[in-house]
Image (tube, helix red, strand yellow):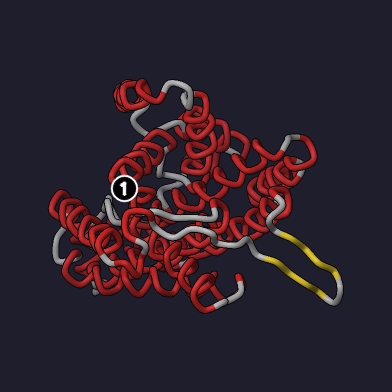
């Protein structure tokens, strides 16, 4: 394996190893906070799948909520165990996204963004008005997972154990997303974004591929929603409101969406920044506004722009001089 190919694997392995030390180094509070970071990184990475096709959506956080509500209802009302509620939440979020995609993806750009906002508000209204979903108070008393493996009992109510569970699921999801993006379908998503007319001229149905991206992203958002429901033990409609959708966009822009690790980097840094502003809630919108303006003026490709030259230099001059392989291969 060449150094260029070994670099991402080595970096990911080192990051996972360092993350695994968190419960042994920090207390329960910061371990739970790192669990929230891991879930948000999963959300940002799934959101990037939509951005790859050139769209931005307000509905993604609501689709995370669909996964969370599905897990909460199945666990509380029907006693489903965690291993079943996890895929059920992902499947339900993907199904709702598939239904929404038919009217929404008849639009593009600004109109798609506004359409996704309307769809998100409609779903949140259902959660608030229908008693089955708990109304404005939402659903609470969601018990943490519990596992009994041949006499070995693991209580995921312990913050450290739940962190390891979340880390394992998030790493698996990130690996799947990385493989999807590296495959032909990922290159087509980029081509649809960068050269939509050219892609259609060679027989690519861009709307179908944008719909597929919307549904796949929702499935991973559903997984994040299930983890969120168990992490906090309760969910409310306000947890998936417009503010969170805007923060998701800001984190993506500030971190950068060109590379896979840009959103991961942005999520980790900005959630730490967000934690530092916890005791100054009233200042948070203004600080975020200034941060967004500064990044768009001086580093429009996000924080990843600072690290891309370093990574390309480590990989060697060939990768930086080569044309975008996604576009080249799709054109062929």
Q: Is residue 19 above or below residue 198?
A: above
Q: Is residue 296 visible?
A: yes
| Nearer-the-camera pick, 279 or 142 | 142
Q: Residue at x 54, y 55 (%)?
A: 233
Which quadrant is home to the C terminus? bottom left
Q: Is residue 316 above or below residue 44?
A: above
| Nearer-the-camera pick, 123 or 127 | 127
Q: Is residue 316 above or below residue 163?
A: above
Q: Is residue 75 left or right of residue 102?
A: right
Q: Is residue 252 left or right of residue 79?
A: left
Q: Which residue is mark 1?
A: 241
Q: Residue most toward the right?
A: 151
Q: Is residue 298 visible?
A: no
Which quadrant is home to the N terminus? bottom right
Q: Residue at x 49, y 47 (%)?
A: 40
Q: Position of residue 52 (x, y in %)?
A: 35, 54
Q: Is residue 19 left or right of residue 102?
A: right
How many numbered marks, from 0 up?
1
Q: Residue at x 36, y 66 (%)?
A: 133
Q: Residue at x 30, y 62 (%)?
A: 127
Q: Is residue 20 left or right of residue 41?
A: right
Element at badge 1?
A: loop
| Nearer-the-camera pick, 38 or 72 | 72
Q: Position of residue 114 (x, y in %)?
A: 16, 51
Q: Position of residue 291 (x, y in %)?
A: 36, 23
In terms of image quadrants, where is residue 280?
top left
In terms of image quadrants, where is residue 243?
top left
Q: Position of residue 186 (x, y in %)?
A: 42, 62
10 Å crowding of disc 1: few (<14), some (14-19), many (20+): some
């Amino acid at each position: 394996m060449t150094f260029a190919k070994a670099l991402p694997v080595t970096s990911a392995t080192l990051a996972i190893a360092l993350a695994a030390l968190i419960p042994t180094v920090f207390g329960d509070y910061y371990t739970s906070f790192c669990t929230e970071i891991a879930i948000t990184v999963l959300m940002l990475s799934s959101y990037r799948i939509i951005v790859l096709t050139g769209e931005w959506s307000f509905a993604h956080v609501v689709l995370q909520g669909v996964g969370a509500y599905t897990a909460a209802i199945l666990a509380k009302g029907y006693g489903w165990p965690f291993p079943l509620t996890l895929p059920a939440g992902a499947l339900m979020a993907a199904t709702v996204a598939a239904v929404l995609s038919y009217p929404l993806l008849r639009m593009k750009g600004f109109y798609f963004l506004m359409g996704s906002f309307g769809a998100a508000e409609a779903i949140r209204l259902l959660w608030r008005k229908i008693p089955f979903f708990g109304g404005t108070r939402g659903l609470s008393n969601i018990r943490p997972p519990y596992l009994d493996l041949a006499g070995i009992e693991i209580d995921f109510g312990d913050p450290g154990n739940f962190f390891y569970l979340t880390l394992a699921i998030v790493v698996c999801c990130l690996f799947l997303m990385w493989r999807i993006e590296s495959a032909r379908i990922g290159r087509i998503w980029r081509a649809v974004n960068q050269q939509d007319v050219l892609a259609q001229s060679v027989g690519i149905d861009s709307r179908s591929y944008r719909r597929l991206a919307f549904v796949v992203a929702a499935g991973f958002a559903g997984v994040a929603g299930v983890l969120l429901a168990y992490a906090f033990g309760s969910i409310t409609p306000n947890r998936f409101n417009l503010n969170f959708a805007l923060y998701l966009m800001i984190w993506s822009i500030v971190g950068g969406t060109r590379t896979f690790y840009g959103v991961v980097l942005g999520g980790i840094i900005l959630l730490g920044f967000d934690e530092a502003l916890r005791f100054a809630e009233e200042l948070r919108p203004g600080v975020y506004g200034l941060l967004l303006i500064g990044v768009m003026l001086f580093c429009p490709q996000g924080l990843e722009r600072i690290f891309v030259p370093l990574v390309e230099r480590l990989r060697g001059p060939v990768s930086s001089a080569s044309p975008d392989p996604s576009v080249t291969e799709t054109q062929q």
